[in-house]
């Protein structure tokens, strides 16, 4: 995010969001050596379902499951195929 290199407020907001997501167990972070809390080296997604929930969205897994149930109910797909997977 190049804008955080030149905008102090944007950088502070970004780092606060990172810390909030780490505290929630959604992300983990690797800080640049000797720059912990200041320069992010990498972000890792630890809990995708929690991220979708935090965004108020249904995860793709939930969406797929709901679509399967609907397809079975509408007799669009064979139940035996779904249960074997």
Image (cartoon, rainbow, N blue to C red):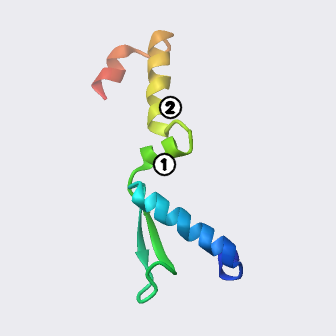
Q: Residues within 10 Å of mark 1 (few under 14, many from 20)?
A: some
Q: Is residue 16 above or below residue 67?
A: below
The residue positioned 49% from the left and 41% from the top of the image is 53
Which quarter of the picture shows residue 68?
top left
The picture places residue 6, in percent across and down from the top left corner, at: 71, 82
The residue positioned 46% from the left and 73% from the top of the image is 42
The picture places residue 75, in percent across and down from the top left corner, at: 47, 10
Quarter of the image for the C terminus: give it.
top left
Q: Is residue 28 above or below residue 56?
A: below
For the residues marked 1 and 2, what is the alpha-carbon distance in whole angstroms?
15 Å
Q: Earlier in the sequence, mark 1 or mark 2?
A: 1
The picture places residue 74, in percent across and down from the top left corner, at: 51, 10
> What SS does tag 2 mark?
helix
Q: Which residue is mark 1?
A: 51
Q: Which residue is mark 2?
A: 63
The residue positioned 45% from the left and 32% from the top of the image is 62
């Amino acid at each position: 995010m190049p804008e955080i290199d030149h905008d102090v407020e944007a950088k502070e907001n970004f780092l606060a969001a990172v810390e909030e997501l780490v505290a929630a167990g959604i992300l983990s972070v690797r800080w640049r050596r000797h720059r912990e809390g200041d320069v992010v080296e990498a972000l890792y997604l630890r809990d995708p379902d929690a991220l979708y929930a935090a965004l108020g969205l249904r995860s793709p897994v939930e969406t797929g499951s709901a679509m399967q149930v609907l397809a079975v109910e509408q007799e669009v797909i064979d139940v035996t195929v779904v249960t074997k997977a």
